[in-house]
Image (tube, rainbow, N blue to C red):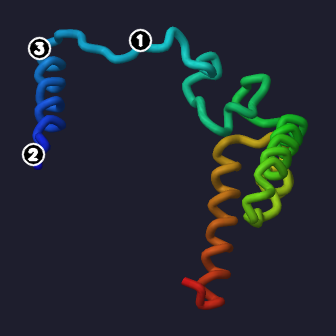
Amino acid sequence: MKRRNTRWPSQLATALIIAGALGLGISFAAPPEQLPNADIGPHAGPFSIHDLDRNGILSREEYGQFLTALEQRRKAADGSGKSYPPPLRFEEIDRNADGYLSEDEMISALNRRLERHKRYRNRSGRW
């Protein structure tokens, strides 16, 4: 029976580390010229993707468009058998009642929902 060389992965890793340290410039793919959503700003993430006018807050209309997209994704994945909690109402998130949602308000609302869920699961003995 032929013996397999199992040392080659570690040898390859060592060679790549040495090449990087020596600055030999080995690259496997060219870096992208520009990221797809690079013009969003420094806080690029799930919240700012839905901030269509890029002002750092979500208006009621932008949040409505987000909910529509969310429902479409959920319907597309409907065959998975998952049950989803209902989305948070705009008023639940907008704690200062200024008519806009900041990222901090969104995070706080999601954390409150998570804490309620944890208390429910602890009370029912499921955790």
Label placed on residue 48: none
Give x and y (percent) for residue 23.
17, 11
Corner quadrant of residue 10: top left
Q: Nearer the viewer, mark 2 or mark 1?
A: 2
Q: CA distance from mark 2 to mark 1?
A: 37 Å
SS for tag 1? loop
Give x and y (percent) for residue 121.
63, 81
On screen, 21 above or below 45?
Answer: above
Label 1: few (<14), some (14–19) or many (≥20) C-alpha neighbours in 10 Å: few
Q: CA distance from mark 2 to mark 3?
A: 33 Å
Q: CA distance from mark 1 to mark 3?
A: 19 Å
Name the residue nearer the viewer: 126 or 10.
10
Residue ID at (11%, 14%): 22
On screen, 22 above or below 100?
Answer: above
Corner quadrant of residue 35: top right
Q: Which residue is mark 2?
A: 3
Q: Quadrant of the C terminus?
A: bottom right
Q: Which residue is mark 3?
A: 22
Tell me the kind of residue under disc 3: Leu
Label placed on residue 30: 1
